[in-house]
Structures are given as C-alpha cells and as structure tokens.
Image (cartoon, coloured by chain):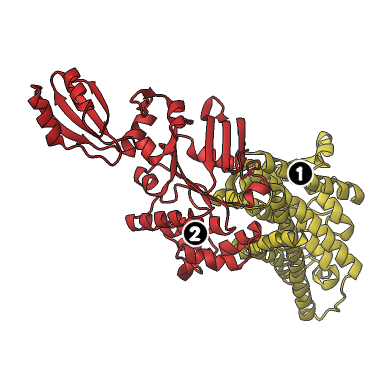
Chain colours: A red, B yellow
Amino acid sequence: MNDQLVIETKGLTKRYGDITAVDHLDLEVRRGEVFGFLGPNGAGKTTTLRMLLGLITASGGAAAVLGAAPGSVESLANTGAMIETPAFYPHLSGRSNLWVLARYAGAPESRIETVLGQVDLAGRGDDPFQTYSLGMKQRLGVAAALLKDPALLILDEPTNGLDPAGMAEMRALIRQLGHGDRTVLLSSHLMNEVEQICDRVGVIANGRMVAEGTVNQLRGDDALLVRADRLEDGQRIVAGMAGVRRVDAGNGVLRIVTEPDTRLDPAYVNQRLVSEGIGVSELRMEQASLESAFLSLTSPDHHTQNENGELATRKEVAHVR
Amino acid sequence: MFGKRFGLLSAELFLMRMRVSTWVLLGIWGTLGFFFSYVLPYFSYRGATGPEAPGAGTDLAALLPESMVETMIGGFPFYGGAIVLILGVLTIGSEFGWGTLKTLFTQRPGRGQIFAAKMGALAIMLVPFVLIIFSIGAVSSVTIALIEDATIVWPSVQELIEAWLAGWLILAVWAAAGVLLAVITRGTSLAIGIGIIYSLVIEGLVSAFANQIELLEPIVKGFLRANAYSLVRPLGGADEAAGDGPGLFTGPFVSGTQALVVLVVYLVVFLGVSVWLLRHRDVA
C-alpha cells in the first residue's frame, strides 16, 4: 500500500441478499486531506464507513485503513469515528461517557477535558447525555472521536440536525481538525458543506463511486451562454478571442468557457458577433456548481465533461484528478 | 497488558454500578426474599391457632439463623435465576438498543476483549448480589430469633461458603443465558420475554409433569432448573417431599457432581456462543 494513502479500497462490495449496498468501490484517501464522501441518502456511504471500521464485514474486495485490516486493533488505535447518530449511555453525563470511552480507547484521562474544550462542551460536561440537544450530542460524538488524538477521523454526516449556527461551528471545527497530518473522511449529502470543508471529493451513487477529484474538478467551469443563429460561424469567431478555452455549439446555443482567472465581457462578445452579421437573441452566465455536477453524476444516466469537453464516464473523471 | 484489561473492567464495573436497573433488580429480589422467606412464613407461624389451622405446618426453626442457608438458597434456582437473567440481558442488550456497542467496537480493543470485560464485570457484580441476599436472610432470621427469644446459632463457615459458591454459579449460568438471548435477539425486550417464558413457564411446567410422565424425566434432568436445584439440594435448598408451590421443585434430581458439571457446561456454552456471534456478526 502507498504510504500516502490512509484509506484504500479495491472492489469493496457489500451485499445484503439480493441487494448490493456497495458495489466494487475503489476509494483512495490521502494522508492529511479532508476528503468528502458525497452521495444521496441510501447511496452506500454509511455502509462503506462501517466496513472501514470493521463494524460490518465486506462481501468482497479489499480494504486497508492506516495500513491495516479494517476493524483491527492496529487501525482502530489511530482512528476516531462518529457513525450516524452519536451513541452514548443516556443516563451518564457527557464527561462520564468520555471517561468510559477513554478507558476503552486507552487514552489518558487528561484528553477528556481537552476534547470537551475543543467542542465547546466543557460547561455542560456533567449533564446527563439524555438531556443534550441534538447539536450537543453531535459535538460529544466528535469529542469522543477525538479522544485518541487520531491520525484518521471518520465523521458520518456530523452536521445532521444542527441549526445554521451549529453547522457553521461544526464545519469550522472539522476544517481546523483537518489541518496538519490528520486525515478527515467526511461523509455528507450537503453540497455546500463539502465545498467549504473538503480538499477532495468522492461521489457515490447506488453503491458505486461515480466521480473523484477536487471540488473544482467536479464542479466544472462557469460558462457564457449565447443564443445565436449561424452557430458554426459564431463558434469560429469566439474561439479566436483571447482567453477562450473552449466553445461548444448545440441546440442554438454557444457555450463559452474561458481560461481560469479570465473574464470574457458579454458585451464585447455580442458586439463582435453582431458586427459579423450573426443575430444574437440572448446572453447569460451559467454558474457552475457542485450541486448541478452532483445531480448529474448521481442521476441514472449520469455523464459529465472532461477538460476536453468530451463526455466522460466515472473512470475518466476519476483520472482527471 | 493487565493495566489495559483492568481499565476495561473498571469501565464496565462503572457502567454496571451506574445502571439503575442493576439496583432495582437487586431490590426486587431482596424484597421477594424478605417477604416470601421470612415475613409471610413468620406471620403464618404466628397466626396458627391449632394443629389444623392455616400456617400450622410452619416450623420456627426454618426462620432462625441456623436455617438461613437452606431458606435463602432455595430462591436462587427460582426467582433469583429469573432476575439475574434480566440482568444478563440488560448487560449487553441495552448496548444494542442505545447503539453504544458500535461506539465501543470502534475503540481500540477487539470484540472478544470487550465481551470479556463485560462478562468479568457481570461476574463480579453477582458477588454482592449473593452476599446481599444472604445478608437479608441473616438480618431477618436474627430479628425473628430476637422476637421469639430463640437461641442464635449460625450456619458453619463451610456451609456458608458452599452456599455462596453454589448460589453464584447458579446466578452466573442464568445471567449467561440472558446474555446469549440478548446477543441472539440484539436487544432487550424479546430476550427478556423469551427468557422469562423459558425459565418460569417452559422449564416450570415440563418439570411439574416430569414426575408423572416418565418420558419427560431425562429431558428435565438436563434443565437448568433441575440442575440448579440439585446443586443446592445438599444444602437443604430443595426437597423431594416438599408440597406444591410456585417456587418449589420436587424433582427429578441429579447428583451434585453431575449438576455442577452440567451447569459449568451451560455456562461455557452460553458464553462461547455469545462471543462467537458477537465477533462474527455485523453491527448495524
């Protein structure tokens, strides 16, 4: 296994009878990155994470976490995790729950106050877990995951149920936790969350990895859309303009993508086309978003465009990174 | 290594100590033992007005300290077993319900170690159960002896130790049965339901017919109830000549040695199957 890969799966599969929850999943998470594991509900995210933690056994394929088998003492010793809803002893206080887990994790008791402080729960640490709000429960879950000061942090939808302020705090915390050598694997179905937090993203749908790359790579480019007649002439004229990277023509529309950090003035495009006798009926900006890319990738007949403007399959997109 | 293992054990003992149900169950058993072994028999004894009157058969000697062992140990195979079966179910079944098993399984130790820590704590917790139940017997019997101005004669130390060990083993087997049911059903409700039905209804009813239907006798001799009563029989905890009653067992009995072996086998099998299932099944 590559030393830089903290998590590596090849053909990882989980079947429940006739249902394939995870289907030949190839996943690579690199040391020190915050990796977003993005997918719609029921896509197989949590099942994958459970396999990585050894909570469930794979039906096929192979996986290594921190160079060891998932769920082994070696991998768990440096992995902190919060899977789905945080699960604690309801009658015990947050602090007592952490004390129990510290005993299990072999973590020094001094870590309890440290992690309670990190998630801003020190003031409520002596209250019973069952009296906590959902946001406090989520924060205690993160605190428990941090007890071992782990090299790998696996968080499954940690902002679930939080109010906007709580979400913002949690995201800032995760971003901060992902600094340095620590690797964070963050499962989510929230686009803006992944855009804000993650260095790289893997998109899973129907148990299969459909794309993997940086947020920018998956999101694609902003484009200027021009509805015009004589598209072929228009495509030739625009392609010759400075800063234009690609021009696609179709359905009566020119789709113009510029080089990074270059802005094409729509008024200038309009003037040039009109001066060449090409009628222009509409100009508008198309804002690229992870959401549209996600919806496209997770639709049954998904496709996207690679840097050359060609339709690309999942594997090709993965190679883009 | 020992330090880490003790760390897990101390965490489990803490969890068990902090679980209200542990003390509620002990309280229920203590109350049952106090009322059914001493209070009601004593009032029955005091209320007897003649040889034919209700309660006339109650022997004061059975309520005095010298008979404490046989009076208290008789409750272990019956309601004591049912109560610790619930304790066993709760020890691990609650973890399924709360989802805390997955939290524990994502910490450092392996599943076998976690199970061992839980069983270790359960085994230790059964010690105060045994001692407290006998303490209730001691206080109750001394109180009656003082009221009746009777001589206080304590059972021998050997008899007490044998009773404690036998009592602990019986409780451990029933608790292990609860653990197995909780692991199989991955919860508490169904496990407790099945456990109570089995211990009180199935074993109870089949045992009741065993003295009349020869075919049932070898089956009953393999039951927990029959072996537990057989183990405490030398201590006076079961009597073939006893009358009918919900807590009475009149046979068939097996030898004390056979009972000991069968109970130990039950204990090993229950725990072995439980840990195997826990290690090999997915945790949702």
Q: Where B223 falls versus A113 (above or below)?
A: above
Q: Chain of mark 2?
A: A
Answer whether residue B239 is visible to the viewer in this image: no
Q: Nearer the viewer, residue A52 or A3?
A: A3
Numbered label attached to residue A140: 2
Q: Quadrant of the C terminus of chain A?
A: top left
Q: Residue at x 33, y 55 (%)?
A: A164
Question: How far across and how far down the image is residue A84, in percent?
Answer: 49, 47
Q: Nearer the viewer, residue B274 or B200?
A: B274
Q: Is A284 left or right of B172, judged from the image as shown?
A: left
State how far apart marks 2 and 1 are (Cα).
34 Å
Q: Nearer the viewer, residue A32 or B258?
A: A32
Q: Chain of mark 1?
A: B
- Count the labels in the image: 2
Q: Nearer the viewer, mark 2 or mark 1?
A: 2
Q: Residue at x 20, y 20 (%)?
A: A251
What amino acid does circle 2 point to?
Answer: Leu
Question: How far across and how far down the image is residue B6, in percent?
Answer: 73, 62
Q: Residues within 10 Å of mark 2 (few under 14, many from 20)?
A: many
**In which image quadrant can residue A146 be found?**
bottom right
Answer whether residue A208 is visible to the viewer in this image: yes
Q: Nearer the viewer, residue B282 or A290?
A: A290
Q: Where B103 falls versus A49 (above or below)?
A: below
Question: How far across and how far down the image is residue A38, in percent?
Answer: 43, 39
Q: Residues within 10 Å of mark 1 (few under 14, many from 20)?
A: some
Question: How far across and how far down the image is residue A121, in percent?
Answer: 46, 65
